[in-house]
Image: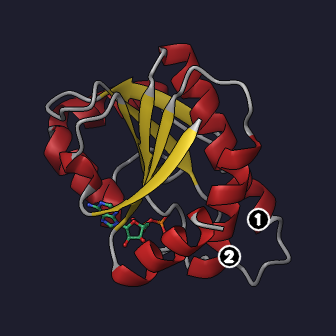
Amino acid sequence: MQIEAVKGDITLLHVDAIVNAANQALAGGGGVDGAIHRAAGAAELHKACAKIGHCDPGDAVATPGFKLSAKWIIHTVGPVWHGGGHNEAAILASCYRKSIEVADRLQARVVAFPAISTGVYGFPQDQAAHIAVDTLRSIDSSTVERSILVAFDDSTFSLYNALLSS
Ligand code: ADP
């Protein structure tokens, strides 16, 4: 699987699936979650999420992309940062792994990820970037040909580029 970084708004990408940094209730919220709900069509996406009802931290579920160019939205719930001693790293790694598993089942070939947990959930950006790159690199068999790490800010974009060139 090829891994690359881009800077920008994940809702605008022409990919098979975008990953959402959702909350456990799949209720929509701020940050990238809010942007995805607005761009996909809040009413329809809300209904699809309500049907699923819940997602545990580290797990992932899928809905259609509705008005997005992306056919699918893979909702994963990142860990809330509580200082690092509460399994945060393992849960974040699981978000990337489970999202790729869901993408495999959907036969998605190109998947875009936001920097899960690095917004209101408070996960340190550099550690999160390492986990994103290391976890995706560790997946050796997948129908996903390309994973795109989408940075919304310059510092995240620099971190991804440094890690991907090493
Ligand atoms: P979390 O609750 O998992 O921390 P946030 O949405 O608060 O999720 O933030 C996760 C990351 O998504 C942050 O780095 C934030 O800057 C980024 N982000 C916010 N909006 C967008 C967007 N439209 N496209 C891509 N990334 C975004």
Q: Is mark 2 within 8 Å of ligand 1?
A: no
Query: Which quarter of the rendering shows the N terminus?
Result: top right
Which of the labelled discs sits on residue 11, or is there none?
Answer: none
Left or right relative to 45: residue 165: right
Residue 58 higher or lower than 119, as above or below: above
Label 1 to label 2: alpha-carbon separation: 8 Å
Secondary structure of the residue carrying numbered label 1: helix
Q: Is residue 144 above or below residue 99?
A: above
Label 1 amino acid? Answer: Ala
Of helix, strand and loop, which one carries label 2?
Answer: helix
- Location of residue 90 (image quadrant): bottom right
Query: Residue at position x 25%, y 63% from top?
Result: 8
Q: Position of residue 155 (x, y in %)?
A: 43, 84
Q: Give the residue displayed 58% in from the left and 62% down from the top.
A: 164
- Residue 26, image x, y percentages: 44, 44
Q: Is residue 156 left or right of residue 16?
A: right
In which quadrant of this rendering is ligand 1 seen?
Answer: bottom left
Outermost residue on the front side: it is 165
Q: Is residue 58 visible?
A: no
Q: Identify the residue at image location x=76%, y=44%.
A: 138
The image quadrant that residue 42 belongs to is top left
For label 2, the residue is 127
Q: Which residue is mark 1?
A: 89
- Give me the residue at 50% from left, 70% from top: 161
Between residues 158 and 152, which one lies in front from this camera angle? 158
